[in-house]
Image (cartoon, grey):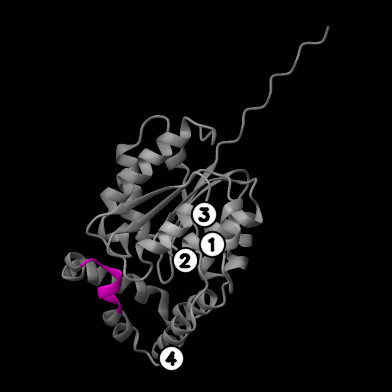
Amino acid sequence: MKPTRPAAAAARPTLVFLPGLASDEEVWADVRAALAQAASPALAPLLDAARVADVHTRCASLPEMAATLLSETTGPLVLLGHSMGGMVAQLAARQAPARVAALALLGSSARADTPELIRLRTEACEHFAAGRIDEVLRANVPFAFHPDGANDSALVARYFAMVRRGGADQLIAQNRAVMAREDNRPHLAAIACPTLVLCGEDDGLTPPEVSREIAEAIPGARMELVPRCGHMLTLEQPQAVAEALGAWLEHIAGGAAGLN
């Protein structure tokens, strides 16, 4: 009688952080540091192998960003997306549902842009093309941050510096990609993986009701609000965000998602 061959161990998912529009890896830096500091032995390997994706800087549309992310990775994925990054994560789950082991959507939306939002983004792109990035950013601060954050000069300066690094061309291209997206709400009910939805309690760009409709549409999704926090929650309240993400990762690691 031939000995039976042991079943191959399931591949450990890759943890991928997806920045939002006009953001880079710095938008996740404080959260990643807090997660690493508090990580249990079970989660440490997952965090050690984590990466920050830059597909939003190289692709012209959100579906292309999702497809490129999938083509440049292998095996199961745990996708953590902020704002536009959350839109890309939703599309990745739609394009390859069997590969997405879990989703965390932070300050994101499943809606298409309204005509009014398209008008505002188009005007902003005209300002970017004319070299008036800071003018748009100053007007955006009250919507991006809780009043406490908006009055924190160091935090706002860090935000401005991050957006300036991307430059006008990236700002224009990413806004065009967001304007062109379709309504993803009809597809949310098909998401079967564990999903966490996080939103700043005072988010003026993607308000809590936008996150709530995502959480209500995805079966079994969990939603949490971050107090005294606006849209840039990973910069404004990184410790609270890390605690929520860490607890959620621990929870799903012990469940069906099989993160270990």
Give whichever of discs 3 and 1 has the lower sequence position. 1
The residue where tag 1 is placed is 88
Whether residue 17 can be seen here: no
**Residue type at the position of mark 1:** Val
**Residue type at the position of mark 2:** Met
Farthest residue, direction top? 1
Q: CA distance from mark 4 to mark 2?
A: 20 Å
Residues tagged 3 and 4 counted as in contact (Cβ below 8 A): no
Report crowding for label 1: few under 14, some 14 to 19, many 20 or more residues within 10 A (C-alpha).
many
Q: CA distance from mark 3 to mark 2?
A: 19 Å
The question of residue 144 being in magenta is answered with yes
The residue where tag 3 is placed is 217
* Residue at position x 44%, y 78% in the image: 171
- In the image, residue 228 lies at what x, y percent? 22, 59
Q: CA distance from mark 1 to mark 4?
A: 25 Å
Residues tagged 1 and 4 counted as in contact (Cβ below 8 A): no
Q: CA distance from mark 3 to mark 4?
A: 36 Å
The residue where tag 4 is placed is 126
- In the image, residue 232 lies at what x, y percent? 32, 64
Give whichever of discs 4 and 2 has the lower sequence position. 2
- In the image, residue 45 lies at what x, y percent? 45, 36
Residues tagged 4 and 2 counted as in contact (Cβ below 8 A): no
Where disc 2 sits, the SS reads: helix
Image height of 161 relative to 202, above or below? below
Give whichever of discs 3 and 2 has the lower sequence position. 2
**Residue type at the position of mark 4:** Glu
